[in-house]
């Protein structure tokens, strides 16, 4: 890619001096040469100096047999400890509790990634391509917070 027509600022932000395209993806290459896409850089959540990839946490949640879908979003910064919020869709007729989910996740993640708050919802908003619409969840969370005040 040579750049954006008539937009030097966007070109400079997207293409480096050697012509490589900055995709905005966080990835790594393992010892066998396989490339893994972890998440979008802009979706990382900062917590106590760490950068947390929502997709990592969502995959832990989705490994629970009673969780049908999950999304992690940045939290509205009311308390220092609550830096991300988990939205979970439970299986039908499941009585899975917030405490059970917190314990399930705690045994599988680093201390700074531990879950502190769960919100149970009916569906995770997704685009037609299947991507989580995080902005919609953030907006819903703001609306719920304002309605409680």
Image (cartoon, rainbow, N blue to C red):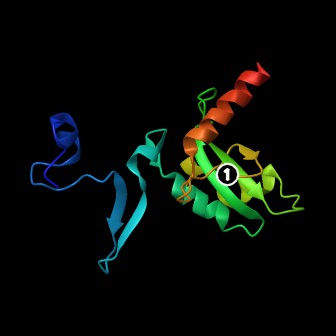
Q: Nearer the viewer, residue 133 or 55?
A: 133
Q: Which residue does the image show at 12% across and 54% down from the upper left? A: 19
Q: Is 82 positioned to the left or the right of 55 in the image?
A: right
Q: Can residue 96 be spotted in the picture?
A: yes
Q: Quadrant for the C terminus, please.
A: top right
Q: Quadrant for the N terminus, please.
A: bottom left
| Residue 86: x %, y % from top left | 66, 47
| Residue 25: x %, y % from top left | 36, 55
| Residue 5: x %, y % from top left | 17, 42
Q: Which residue does the image show at 79% across and 50% down from the upper left? A: 98
Note whether 11 is above or below 101 in the view shown: above
Give residue 66's quadrant in the image.
bottom right
Secondary structure, mark 1, is loop
Where is mark 1, residue-wise?
Answer: 124
Q: Which residue does the image show at 41% across and 44% down from the upper left? A: 42
| Residue 27: x %, y % from top left | 35, 61
Q: Is 83 positioned to the left or the right of 63 in the image?
A: left
Q: Nearer the viewer, residue 72 or 8?
A: 8
Q: Which residue does the image show at 16% across and 47% down from the upper left? A: 3
Q: Is 107 positioned to the left or the right of 43 in the image?
A: right
């Amino acid at each position: 890619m040579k750049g954006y027509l008539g937009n030097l600022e966007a070109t400079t932000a997207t293409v480096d001096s050697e012509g490589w395209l900055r995709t905005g993806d966080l990835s790594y290459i393992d010892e066998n040469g396989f490339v893994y896409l972890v998440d979008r850089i802009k979706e990382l959540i900062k917590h106590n100096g760490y950068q947390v990839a929502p997709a990592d946490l969502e995959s832990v949640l989705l490994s629970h047999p009673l969780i049908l879908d999950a999304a992690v979003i940045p939290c509205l910064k009311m308390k220092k400890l609550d830096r991300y919020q988990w939205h979970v869709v439970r299986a039908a007729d499941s009585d899975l509790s917030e405490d059970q989910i917190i314990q399930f996740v705690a045994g599988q993640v680093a201390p700074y990634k531990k879950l502190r708050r769960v919100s149970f919802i009916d569906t995770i908003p997704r685009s037609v391509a299947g991507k989580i619409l995080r902005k919609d969840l953030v907006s819903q969370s703001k609306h719920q917070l304002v309605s409680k005040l």
